Amino acid sequence: MPPSPTRERKEIKIRTPDNPEDIPRKQKLYGNQAIKALFELQNFPNNAILLGDFNLHHPNWNPLHPSPSTLAEPFVEWSNSRNLHLISPIGTPTHSKGNVLDLTFLSGPYTAYTALAEQLECTSDHSTLKTYLHWNYRSQKPAKKLKLNTLNETLFKDLLETNLTNIAAIPRTPSLRDLDQAASSLTQALTKAYTGSARRSINGPLQQPWWNKDCIKAVYKHRITNTPTSKRSLRKTVRKAKHTFYITKVDKVEDINDVYRMAKWHQSTGIYRTPPLADLSKQTIANTIEEKRETFANNLLTNLAEVDDIPFDTPTAPSRSITFPDIAIQDIELAILKAGNTAPGADEIPTKILQVAWLQIKEVTLSLFKGCLHLGHHPKCFRLATIVIIPKPNKPDYTNPRSYRPIALLSVLGKGLERLIAKKVSWLALNYQVLANQQLGALPLRSSVDLTTCVTHDIEASLKQGLKTTLLTMDVKGAFDAVLPGRLVNRLREQGWPNNLVRWVQSFATNRSIKIRLDGETGPETKLECGLPQGSPISPILFMLYIAPLFWMGKPQSRFGYADDIAILATSNSLQTNCDSLKMDMQETLEWGKTEGITFDPKKSELIHFYKGHRTLTDTPAIHTGSMNIEVKPGPLKWLGVHFDRKLCFKPHVQILAAKALKGANALRSLSNTHRGIPPYLTRKVAEACILKKCYFASETWWPGRTRTKKNALNNPISISNVVDSHLSLLNKVVITCTRAILPVYKTTNTAVLYEEAKLRPSEIELNLISQLYAARTTRLDLYHPLRIRAENITKAREYNRTPDTRFARLITALPETEHINPLAFPPWEIRESRAEAEARINGPMGRTKAQAAEDFKAFHAKIPRSDIQIFSDGSKSESKDGATGGGFVISQFDIQIAHHSFSLGTNAEVFDAEATAAVAGAAKALTLASTKLATDLWIFLDNHEAALRLGSHFNGSSQRVFEDFLKLTQAWAEGTKLPFPLNPICTLASLKRMIRTRANKADEQLWNTVSPQYYKDLQFNHTSNTDTLSLKRATLHHILAIRSQHGDFAAYHERFNHTTAHVHCSCGKRKTPLHFFFCKKGKAFKALTKSPPSEAIPWLLRNPTGIAKLAEWLEYTKFYTKICPWHTGAR
């Protein structure tokens, strides 16, 4: 529908393939204002249908109402002048009060008639009218999808085996045509086998899942009687059917994925056809499905820049030489089989099918992928994409094509090759430093939060120095669709990528074709001249390489980029100086973009100033350059999901995210109550994953801690508040709502009890944990990472007492000296043994019990030659207050102990670290012994399963150096090789993480000991992180929690809140109390559950996991609270 100046009128253009002229336009009218708006129309179409609720009385359509309405006569004159003829039934009431209000008029050379549609009765006070327009156009039928759950695997494999016999083998030196033919034949073989072994969906009429036989009977009865009583009965039946269906669906949920979908019910907006689109390039309105597809192609899939592409063979000088590794079968399996079940492309082959067929297609796939990379060719069938148009959320105008996102559905097999190459390119781009260190995106161990944390740290550091900082953000318009293939190939050659990879990228980015799927209809195949498919695994890293020069311009340390989002910082003593500097940077950026076919969206460019003191918006300068004028807007600036405010207090950010999270928490809470709903343990998982993650997003960037330490005039440290109480209040509200969604408890339950029983932390403790783990993460980042660079600078500045007082600096300075791990030490494509292979190598448990493994070891050990060297190593952690970790080894040969050693790693290591260190130290020591020459093999025995699995392979985790030393020992040994034990061991990564989590648990425990209610103290209920209780049935858990918290269907509770209608006595005659279940003469729990005295039995039943399980079993078996002591449901 094209935009209308008034909500009372809507236009719809309808066209046929045979007649491009406009035929009927529908005008929806409401009220007298709409009638007057009709009179004012200048160009009313000659061919039109006019229908709606006119609310006019006139004898022309209602002879029984002789007195016309005020506007009825003018309307009749107007309609006659427009050749509009009444085609709705005359004198037939369309309203429940007997009036004829709903009318239909027709003009033009068309035939139509209107009649009452009783079968479409919807219990409204208006009758339903149905207009029949004689029109022979038929829309495309929706495609029937293959249903994966109907797959017959045996039949599929048999059909595939037959199909594969007809595929010619790929030659050793294949041509481009051979590769295209092989890929096409393999895809067709899979598709035919899948089609022949699975059924397609039945695209019947849409029906609501809650519709049942009662609804059908109610509709049939209403159509026969058509009385107010039957109408009310139909509405009541429909409401009951909906209620019953959704209650049953929620109560029977067992799969976590179903709960994730339910948590999004409140976000559902329905499924609607795409409205008419305003074609920005042609200044026209697109109404038909063909016009809409063309509009999307012109606006979203075309480079609108004025610059032309350049030839592929443009000469260039590479800045480096990058060696690209060969493809191994392990790479392919990881890229295809471990990728998840992504949406299939035009060939309809999902990941699951490739997993089933893998053993049959393994060799041909390896040959195909190797040939593609060697020749630099991407098969033609992999370059066909089905484009699905998805509306972007929360856009104000969906007639604008830019409010939609095109997603390319590609062949899953082809995406495997793209994913494999993308992973290698990303690692090589980091290792060879092709990209600027502050250009993040499709790279390992780099997230958007890393970039916002860097920006925040830099701004804070400048503010502490008394300077002023300005942040400018820009957005690349079109992003992937703006990439010109010739310029992309030229950029890759400049960066030094090998020729075969460059040729493959050229093949991947050219001669692409698409089919646009819109409103259930798939359009014809059309060619694309430029752009990268949005949905391909390799498009993000190729786009980053394409715009890489942008981040080497000017001052690279002041430029930040994540995919197509760019930010530039300027710092000086003056805001005007900042704007002048940013203006120059912006002009340089725009000029570079103009030469490369990159345009920037002025609507998404924003500016914000950071400074101390008070200054009004009229005093803050702006940036004006060319066609882009960027003013400072009131309110926060949003970049990468973080809302930056002028004072960097981030209160608007917390308010916005907390409001969104609270909406989801309330929706989750509405799905359950105290006796039915989603199991508590599933609700907790969803709350943590979908709600708390949302409200804690980017807390690593903004959380400053409740207080910070500063030295006063006497050089004494004092604590200063960071004024975050309002932040915590907003977040705690979300957490509490989540606890109420998880737990089947009354609204009046104590807040401390809610935190403890739901096993969720208060926001302050959780934020401290998140930020401290984030700081620990810097120890396993590569030296080129922007966070690692800042962390190193902070550490160096601390030696000179010049540490900047920023959020990030305070986190880094609080860390103990910790080992550094290099994640780029070994390429990810390095062939490594699988976990199953490692299990077999070390003779691991592999499903055996400890007793079985012990017996098998005795038999195995007896077969080892006595001349072989045997090393028994072990590690342990002291349970004393200091918690020191140590290890040791014993070396034996010929059943004689020939060496032993023990050592301490201090308090900053874990058992895992000690086990690995002891094993490696034992091996190093054994190789120095004179009797080693008498041994054939050297055996190491240790009881830490994970440490044993890691020995013998590269490891990017805790104690990385130890595992690398072991590999050196296995490869070569020189006289004197040994492992020195440092006098002051540094903290290992595993120990650091354990220390941080232990600190959070202690904070939880201290808080619980302080605020826990007296009745929990009477039960000697200590803080625990065990969540087994949440696995109980919801109704059963409610009763146990009610007994613990004393907030339930008890006499004292009802009297406290003045519930005059409550039943306060059990059927045995005694008053309801929390502990009545144990002493009730009818229930006889004191005999059935335990023989211990009540003082011991009751705490055991309500605190101990075994006792709770036994109590739950008894409650469900006896139905105590439903039959013996029924609860009062009206008290909640």
Image (tube, rainbow, N blue to C red):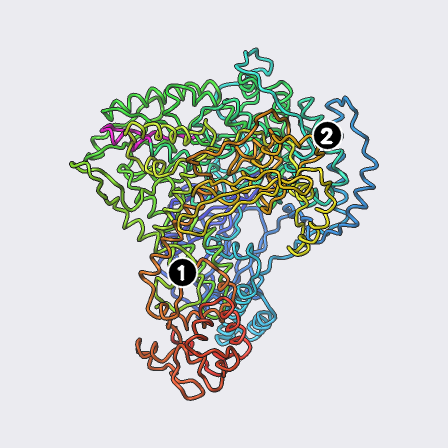
Q: CA distance from mark 1 to mark 2?
A: 58 Å
Tag nearer the camera, 1 or 2: 1
Q: Position of residue 921 (x, y in %)?
A: 56, 35
Find disc 1 in the rendering and name its residue: 1023
Q: Position of residue 352 (x, y in %)?
A: 67, 46
Q: Is residue 872 above or below residue 68?
A: above
Which quadrant of the figure has residue 674?
bottom left
Q: Is residue 63 visible?
A: no
Q: SS at mark 2?
A: helix
Residue at 65% across, 38% down: 336
Q: Is residue 812 visible?
A: yes
Q: Which of these two is toward me, 9 or 811?
A: 811
Q: Which of these two is toward me, 835 or 331?
A: 835
Dot 1: few (<14), some (14–19), or many (≥20) neighbours within 10 Å? some
Is 299 left or right of 1052, judged from the image as shown? right
Residue 224, numbered label: none
Q: Position of residue 1082 (x, y in %)?
A: 49, 86
Residue type, numbered disc 1: His
Residue at 66% across, 50% down: 845
Q: Which of these two is toward me, 148 or 852?
A: 852
Is 651 left or right of 352, judged from the image as shown? left
Is 663 left or right of 310, judged from the image as shown? left
Q: First in sequence, mark 1 or 2: give its number.
A: 2
Which quadrant of the figure has residue 191?
top right
Q: SS at mark 1?
A: loop
Q: Position of residue 627 (x, y in %)?
A: 36, 24
Residue 467 in the magenta stretch? The answer is: yes
Which quadrant of the figure has residue 575?
top left
Is 818 left or right of 486, judged from the image as shown? left
Q: Which residues are magenta?
A: 458-475
Find disc 2 in the rendering and name its residue: 368
Residue type, numbered disc 2: Leu
